Each structure stands twice: as structure tokens, then as C-alpha cells.
Image: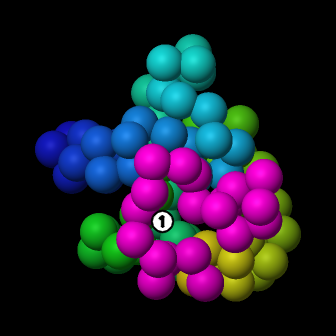
Amino acid sequence: QALKDKIRAKYNFTCQKCGLQESDHYRRLAIHHIDYDKTNNAEGNLIPLGSTCNSNVNKERQGWLALFCQLRIREPRASYIFGALTGR
């Protein structure tokens, strides 16, 4: 639980796909494993996502894996990383 809380705080409690704050969701942000390996709990492999976004990235995994791997080399920002890459 402490690691999950640390990851949420690291990304300012913001979903890294849609940019909504945790307070805008009905539940706490999920912690997504970028490489889809649930045993890889390295901080650089973890990002917070809202429940809907987390469900969405489990479809077409290869595309999301490629995108999130590009993003994982960037430092977290006040804005969400998906928006930073796409210009949203």
C-alpha cells in the first residue's frame, strides 16, 4: 500500500491517461504496471490510472506498452504524461 500511495503522490494524484485528478474519480487511482508484469514493482514501471483508463489500457496492450515505454523515461510533471506527449 505504501508503494501505491508513493506512486499516486509522485504523479500528483493524476491519472496518467486522461489527466483527471483522483478526487474526480469515484475511487482511488489504480496503479498500472507499464510492462503488464505484475511482479515488476519498480517505481519506473508504475503509473496511476483511473479505473476506466486502467480497463482501457488492457485492450490493445502492445500499442499501450509502446506508448507508456516511451513515456516512462520522462520525469513526472504536474500535468499528466499522456497529455504531455500528445499535446492535450
Query: What residue sits 48% from the left and 65% below the top?
Result: 33
Tell me the magenta residue range: 70-88
Residue 79, placed above or below residue 52: below
Q: Is residue 4 visible?
A: no
Query: Residue 59 is drawn in which quadrant?
Result: bottom right
Question: Where residue 18 appears, x then y in whole percent?
Answer: 70, 43
Is residue 72 one of those drawn in magenta? Answer: yes
Q: Is residue 1 visible?
A: yes
Residue 66: give x, y in percent of width and height: 70, 84
How many numbered marks does the figure carry? 1
Does residue 68 appear to the left or right of 72 in the view shown?
A: right
Mark 1 element type: strand
Is residue 43 placed above or below 14 in the rendered structure? Answer: below
Q: Amino acid at mark 1?
A: His
Quadrant in which the N terminus appears: top left
Query: Residue at the location (49% across, 18% down)?
Result: 23
Q: Is residue 73 above or below residue 47?
A: below
73 magenta-colored: yes
Colouring: rainbow
Q: Is residue 6 left or right of residue 24?
A: left
Q: Is residue 88 above or below residue 53?
A: below
Q: Position of residue 14 (x, y in %)?
A: 50, 40
Residue drawn at the location 58% of the way across and 21% of the way down: 25
Tell me if mark 1 has few (under 14), some (14-19) or many (20+) residues whose alpha carbon lies within 10 angstroms of its own.
Answer: many
Q: Nearer the viewer, residue 41 or 80?
A: 80
User: Residue 13: percent from the left, percent from the top?
Assistant: 41, 37
Q: Residue furthest left?
A: 2
Residue 45 in the figure: left or right of residue 64: left
Q: Which residue is mark 1?
A: 33
